[in-house]
Image (cartoon, rainbow, N blue to C red):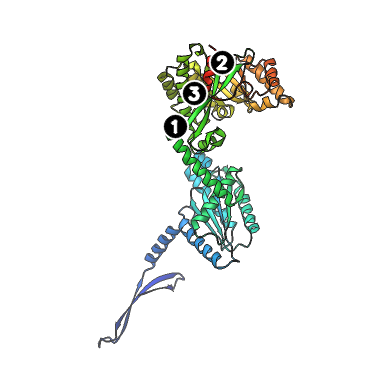
Amino acid sequence: MVEFRARHANGGWRWIEATASNWLDDPAVQGVIVNYRDITERKLMELRLQHGVLHDALTGLPNRVLLSNRLGQAIKRSQRNPQYHFAVLFLDLDHFKVINDSFGHPVGDRFLVTAASRLHRCLRSTDTCARLGGDEFVILLDDIHSLDAVVQVARRIIQQLSLPVEIDAQMLHSSVSIGIVFGSAEYNDPAEVLRDADIAMYRAKASGKSRYEVFHPAMREAAQARLALENELRRAIAQGEFIVYYQPIVNISSGELIGFEALVRWQHPTRGILTPAAFLDVAEEVGLGDAIGWQVLEHVCRQLATWQHSFPHAAHLSVSVNLSARQFMQPELYVRIVQLLTQYNIPPNCLKLELTESALMEYSQEAAAVLGRLRSYGIQIAIDDFGVGYSSLSYLIQLPIDQIKIDRNFIIQLDQAHHSQAIVRAIVNLARSLDLKVVAEGLETTEQVDRMRTVGCHYGQGYLLGYPLPAAEAIRLLQGGE
């Protein structure tokens, strides 16, 4: 049996299946009988199925299977010929989720089709542009002679994909982050190349988006270290390795202790006590910040209950706890906090929740309702790092808050920068007019304390007034107040 194509009289092509039977020994026939059958429809169906297995249904581009096959061939060729080089570009559209969420998936799909078309126009006929899924694309540049040539392609892609796309009279904007691997014989598996290109792409996103990064082995080490940190964080949450340190907040006029700020620490089994700078950003990015935040809140409530039982004179003290923007907007926030206060029999006014100015601006409409409910229950509300979003004061005035904390960067510059002095003075005057308390963060010199006292600031915290202390050492401050 044999299959072949034949030109039809109408100019098209037909697929024919021919089967030959040997009847030479039959006296009545003494020949070969060939049966022909038109199998065009079946063949076209097979080709469509084969294409579907190897191509993306939305864009028609090669998919991961076909890309891996071609990349595998490029790797083998580079191992045979030292003069041959290839490159892989891993692309991810920036802000594509905003387009999908704002205009719906049908519009998002049309945007992807347009992006795929623009990518294809940036390449040679020998190159491969594949879609892995979502808004991720991979380009294989075949027989590319230098990294400079690869960079030129990347820049051309960034320029093309930064142009607006018009869909249904809407001008949609996006950009692209690109990770580049300049292929060499050191690779043995397509998955290794894609992994490293993906790592470089995430470095491009972290560096500001709409740019490219060329992979370097140090990036892989950093990515592996980050993955190890993620795994350690999950274990630390499960095993309760997070503890709380307490930094004193004092009345800078009288020196009286009025409360503490709760600061999370990681009691790492091998690295010792770690500050948030070593882990909190990663925890927030992978969605573990909420779990850590709730553990801190429970630690604080438990500690407040112990202090109030042991030191009746400290019943007026409050502890400030930082909430991330994500934790602040959890639907169950109010209920869970009330449950904790009830469980440990803590008066609501002993808990002070701190939110950054940027977090409140991100959720300005919803924030007022959430804060109003918490404050009505008796929980105090403070705005942390105040002054960074100074242009948004008109919004903040409308929020139900009790206290503002001046960002330490303004305090540090008090002696050198005149504008910092003016901003600090304006913040304090604003707080007075709104009957709000003011805490100066980062006080480290007597001159800074004197300046804040002169402008009418109520409270302060910083290394000059007290370092963050574990609970056992914070007790000594309470004992000293008896």
Upstream in sequence: badge 3 or badge 2: 2
Q: Which one is in front, 399 or 457?
A: 457
| Picture disc at residue 370 | 3
Q: From the viewer's perspective, tell me whether residue 10 is left or right of residue 216.
A: left
Residue for badge 2: 258
Q: Which residue is mark 1?
A: 240
Judging depth in this view, the residue of 364 and 184 nearest the camera is 184
Secondary element under disc 1, as helix, strand or loop, is loop
Q: Identify residue type, mark 3.
A: Val
Tell me: residue 282, above or below residue 304.
Answer: below
Q: In terms of secondary structure, where does tag 2 sit?
A: strand
CA distance for labels 2 and 1: 29 Å
Answer few, some or many: residues within 10 Å of disc 3's Cα (few below 14, many 20 plus, some between 14 and 19).
some
Which mark lies nearer to you, 1 or 3? 1
Q: What's under tag 2, amino acid-wise?
A: Ile
Seen in the picture, residue 227 relative to 343 is either above or below; the reply is below
